[in-house]
Amino acid sequence: MSQPAARPADEPIRVGVIGARGRMGSEVCRAVDAAPDMDLVAMASSGDWLFNIADAGAEVVVDFTHPDVVMDNVRFCVDQGIHCVVGTSGFDAERLATVRSWLEHKPQLGVLVAPNFAIGAVLSMKFAEMAARFYESVEIIELHHARKADAPSGTAARTAELVAQARAEAKMEPCPDATTHQAPGARGAELDGVRVHSVRLSGLVAHQEVLFGTEGETLTLRHDSLDRKSFMPGVLLGVRELLTHPGLTVGLEAFLGLDRP
Ligand SMILES: NC(=O)C1=CN([C@@H]2O[C@H](COP(=O)(O)OP(=O)(O)OC[C@H]3O[C@@H](n4cnc5c(N)ncnc54)[C@H](OP(=O)(O)O)[C@@H]3O)[C@@H](O)[C@H]2O)C=CC1
Ligand SMILES: O=C(O)C1=N[C@H](C(=O)O)C[C@H](O)C1
């Protein structure tokens, strides 16, 4: 089984992109191309042979594909000893545990799974986690472009998970909700006890509101990605940091120093 080779620090990082023709993948190719410390050595699209990426000597792969195929791509990278930055959505606890198990025998290899690479989205998730214990009610509204394949978004699922953990630690009751009559879906999906509503609208990119409420006040945390360029600094940071962060990292927080109190 391959391990990543020791690398000279002053050489550009050799990066491959899977999903290179997609909305995110094409933006990543442009960002990597423009980064002075990176070389874009391989681009794979659906139907392409992934071994081209290994043959090109990629050290780090960036994956923006589809929840149905991403696990095969990560498995390929781990088998080939290539670090992997994963932006594709669809990761639950079971998938993360599987990736962790693949990495057990690869002590030098890193995989980053980040539900959202935009700094404001990462901060918003952090702020939601902080606010959760102070408000009896919370609901999430995520709003995306109409071509998005999955609902709810990976960001909303992660936000719900973080909020639910904070509420459980504070031993809070379920959110109050007296609804007894409703049209199917009117109250959204329930994730970890948190209601999540998904809007799909042409013209949007990626947006989220976390609504908190308690006696006499509400707090709304809103983040808007208005352009896919908003994700690029985070993706490039992930590529650089993975070289020195073996194992599975979930979320960009650790690479931004936001995992510390
Ligand atoms: N973490 C983050 O910050 C962000 C995450 N995302 C996530 O990234 C993913 C992609 O989003 P987006 O770029 O909008 O989607 P797109 O549909 O625009 O792009 C996905 C691309 O992946 C290609 N693809 C599908 N299967 C394979 C495969 N087996 N091997 C190689 N390429 C493949 C598709 O090709 P084809 O069209 O030919 O099938 C398509 O070009 C989604 O899960 C989305 O939620 C999006 C934005 C930010
Ligand atoms: O599909 C998208 O566009 C996005 N997907 C990610 C998600 O599902 O959370 C990140 C961001 O919201 C954009």
Image (tube, rainbow, N blue to C red):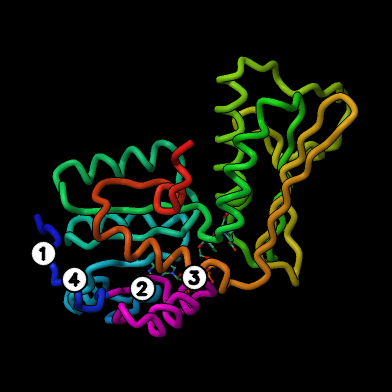
Task: For mark 2, give the secondary structure.
Answer: strand
Quarter of the figure with residue 56: bottom left
Q: CA distance from mark 2 to mark 1?
A: 19 Å
Name the residue beneath numbered marker 3.
232
| Disc 2 residue: CB within 8 Å of ligand 1 | no
Taking the view exactly as shown, the residue that stands out farthest to the front is 261
In the rendered view, tell whether residue 50 sits above or below residue 222: below
Q: Which mark is residue 5?
A: 1
Which of the two labelled residues, at mark 3 and mark 4, occupies the earlier sequence position? Answer: 4
Where is mark 4, residue-wise? 9
The residue under label 3 is which amino acid type?
A: Met
Of labels 2 and 4, earlier in sequence is 4
Name the disc covering residue 17, or none: 2
Amino acid at pointer 4: Ala
Q: Amino acid at mark 1?
A: Ala
Q: Which quarter of the picture shows residue 10?
A: bottom left
